[in-house]
Amino acid sequence: MPVIECDTADARDRLREAGVEITPGNTDHEQWRATDGDATAVAYEGKVVVQGQRTDRLVGLLRGGGGRAYVYFDGACRGNPGPAAIGYAIVTGDGIAAEGGEQVGRMTNNRAEYEALIRALEVATARGFDTLEIKGDSQLVVKQVRGEWDTNDPDLRERRVRVRELLSGVDWSIEHVPREINERADNLANDAFDASR
């Protein structure tokens, strides 16, 4: 549960400008509440506490965003197609800003790689990073996103479009890296498989 120390009036204004609904607090100690999807931010004197699922957007808005992040992504399948899982890690000079892994249903390995990248970019852009250095071990995804390879599969083409939408307005680069450099994202994807057992 992230706790962001801040000027709560400024934080409220940032959320309101981003279209987040603000309501009065439920107790004398709560200044206001904001809900965004499954996440809720509650303001107290000098701090805002964020709780719920997928808190990344609220946290990014409250922190004011900006800065550089390194985004690592990986998708994995058991069979091709087969049950799939994704993993991602977003790293800054201060350490891991966000990471996660989850099962994403049945799909091909290439689609799982795209799903991992999309989820990582959703988190990174919600946090407000304005410079992203993206690294993954899928040569196909990297070269398609760069525009070096055609995206003939309609399913993958749709995901490539979504990736480029998420990257609009952000300075970015994407690089193919060996699996050992992408180890954290790979481990998070595999851990998501193991969590279902």
Image (cartoon, rainbow, N blue to C red):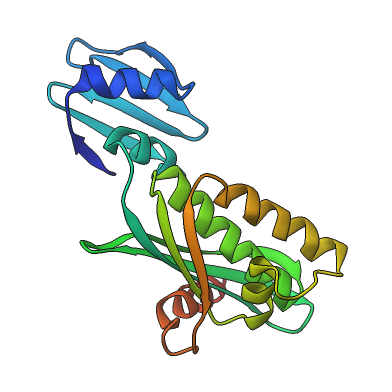
Of all residues, the one furthest to the left in this rendering is 46
- Image-based side of 114 in relation to 65, left or right: right
Residue 146 position, x and y percent, is 64, 68
Q: Residue at x 35, y 24 (%)?
A: 14
Quadrant including the N terminus: top left
User: Measured along the vertical axis of the image, is residue 42 above or below residue 78?
Assistant: above
Residue under the image location 40 percent in, 15 percent down:
22
Q: Nearer the viewer, residue 40 or 68?
A: 68
Left/right of residue 165 with respect to residue 61 in the rendered view: right
Question: Is 115 in front, or is 13?
Answer: 13
Q: Position of residue 107 (x, y in %)?
A: 76, 70
Q: Is residue 151 left or right of residue 14?
A: right
Q: Is residue 139 above or below residue 8?
A: below
Residue at (22, 39) in percent of width and height:
3
Quadrant holding the C terminus: bottom right
Which quarter of the picture shows residue 66? top left
Q: Is residue 184 visible?
A: yes
- x and y, in percent, of residue 137 in the image: 55, 82
In percent of width and height, residue 10 lies at: 24, 20
Residue drawn at 72 percent across, 69 percent down: 111
Left or right, residue 172 beside residue 165: left
Does residue 155 lie above or below 75 as drawn? above
Can residue 195 be seen here? no
**What is the count of numbered marks?**
0
